[in-house]
Amino acid sequence: MYVFDREAYNKRMEWYLDARFGMFIHWGLYSIPARGEWVRSTEEMPKEEYMQFFEEFDPVDYDPKAWAKAAKEAGMKYVVLTAKHHDGFCLFDSQYTDFKSTNTKCGRDLVAEFVEAVRAEGLKVGLYFTLIDWYHEDYPHYGDKNHPMRNNENYKNNGRNFDNYLTYMHNQIREICTNYGKLDVLWFDFSYDDMRGEKWKATELMDMVRSLQPDVIIDNRLECSGEGYGSLAQGNPTPYHGDFVSPEQMIPPNGIQDVNGNDLAWEACMTMNNNWGFHATDHFFKPASMLIKKLVECVSKGGNLLLNVGPDARGNIPGESMEILCEIGKWMKKNGRSIYGCGKAEIQKPDYGRVTRNGNHLYFHLYENTVGPVPLLGIKKDEVRAVRYLETGAEVPISNSWVHSDYPDIVFADLGPDPILPNSIDTVLEVVLK
Ligand code: GLC
């Protein structure tokens, strides 16, 4: 039976904590109605009505190589695709259901092509799999918190056999852990009310998963959701504990610590606009400049960022998202060293930006300039070996000006006469300590 082992845990988490930045992909039948991935639930849509999208689904432009390339170009190190979302539709060829991509017009195992494309780009591969299923007859309908038929008395639950459902769910998870090679991340979604932990037969499930995929990194949603930290944080990990906390649509103000005050691994998942699945009229995209700073914020608080795209019904990542990814990539190409392998600096956040750290390398992220040389608070003059612009490697002199004579202990970095910072989004100074 799986038991938590700190050493094994630290080992499997290594690449993930280095990576810091990943892509989330929400894609499925719901890209056709294009009102978000919860459309069947929010509109309380009967199954029969939703089936039109199953009949129609034909993503002629699906090209996971292009997705993987976009992720790589953006500087992302891993990609997580919804193998199955709450609507129950499988993007993989499951032998346990007919409700799958191989039975649509496209006839393809979308997951198989995805994992291959992602690995070919040298990225780590993750699959999202929801514990919830609005298609399966044995999943609670009436009175459930989320089910599309939750308010419809014709869908009372007499005769539904939840154990049957669990067998089905476990079987499908066995399939994705068996048929698609080594998985780096398994992203379960999500627990609610009394639907958590052993209600999912989680010990049994995780025993299977850990034996089939010993190195896979798993989120904490067998125990909780975007809300709640889980048993690793409580200092008493269950056999189905998550490897990281999964805050959703927010960045934890102080990072996340366990009951003993030790930092925990976490990953903020975030949409670029306001929906996970493709939404035809949601054009409220966060600008790349903002997302770069949010990535820096996550890293400076010891976390990862999993940034979402929602491809459309043809299989294309929206143009807005592609442009944003491209712009993030430009910054990452020059400044990735202040992200990968970095974490908290244990230095107070400066007025003008943030600080990340990798060993004896400190990265001062400047979002706005100071008047005159920039005070690098939190380090001592005699500790500093070098200060460089990360983008160019050019030396940044330390100021000896008389205007700082009242602050002999503070290192002031002299950026020269131009008040405009060289990178208008985030200019990174690399400080190498002795
Ligand atoms: C939520 C939603 C879901 C989304 C997930 C991503 O819990 O149910 O649609 O997939 O968050 O974190």
Image (cartoon, rainbow, N blue to C red):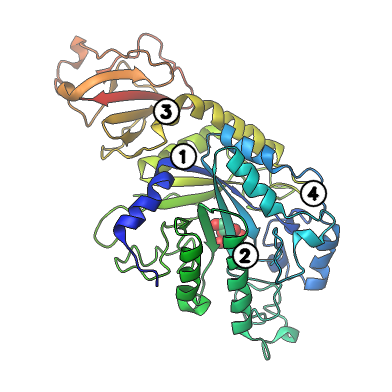
Task: Please name the residue that numbered disc 4 is placed on.
Answer: 59
Q: Position of residue 103 (x, y in %)?
A: 81, 62
Marks 3, 1: nearer the viewer: 1
Marks 2, 3: nearer the viewer: 2
Residue contact between numbered discs 3 and 1, judged by CB atoms under 8 Å: no
Q: Position of residue 116 (x, y in %)?
A: 64, 46
Task: Kindly report the distance in space between the C-alpha atoms of the residues bearing marks 2 and 1.
Answer: 33 Å
Q: Earlier in the sequence, mark 2 or mark 1?
A: 2
In the figure, is residue 336 to the left or right of 270?
A: left
Task: Kindly report the distance in space between the C-alpha atoms of the residues bearing marks 2 and 4.
Answer: 23 Å
Mark 1 Cα shell of 10 Å, populated few (<14), some (14-19), many (≥20): many
Q: Taking the image as four quarters, which one is ligand 1 found in? A: bottom right
Task: Kindly report the distance in space between the C-alpha atoms of the residues bearing marks 3 and 1.
Answer: 13 Å
Q: Earlier in the sequence, mark 3 or mark 1?
A: 1
What type is the residue that disc 2 sits on?
Glu
Task: Kindly report the distance in space between the C-alpha atoms of the residues bearing marks 2 and 3.
Answer: 47 Å
In the figure, is residue 359 to the left or right of 31?
A: left
Q: Helix or strand or loop: what does disc 4 sit on? A: loop
Residue appearing at x 41%, y 30% in the figure:
337
Q: Earlier in the sequence, mark 3 or mark 4?
A: 4
Task: Please name the residue that numbered disc 2 is placed on.
Answer: 175
Residue contact between numbered discs 2 and 4, judged by CB atoms under 8 Å: no
Task: Please name the residue that numbered disc 1 is placed on.
Answer: 295
Q: Position of residue 167 (x, y in %)?
A: 60, 78
What type is the residue that disc 3 sits on?
Tyr
In the figure, is residue 256 to the left or right of 172?
A: left
Can residue 425 be seen in this snapshot?
Answer: yes
Q: Earlier in the sequence, mark 1 or mark 4?
A: 4
Residue appearing at x 45%, y 74% in the figure:
203
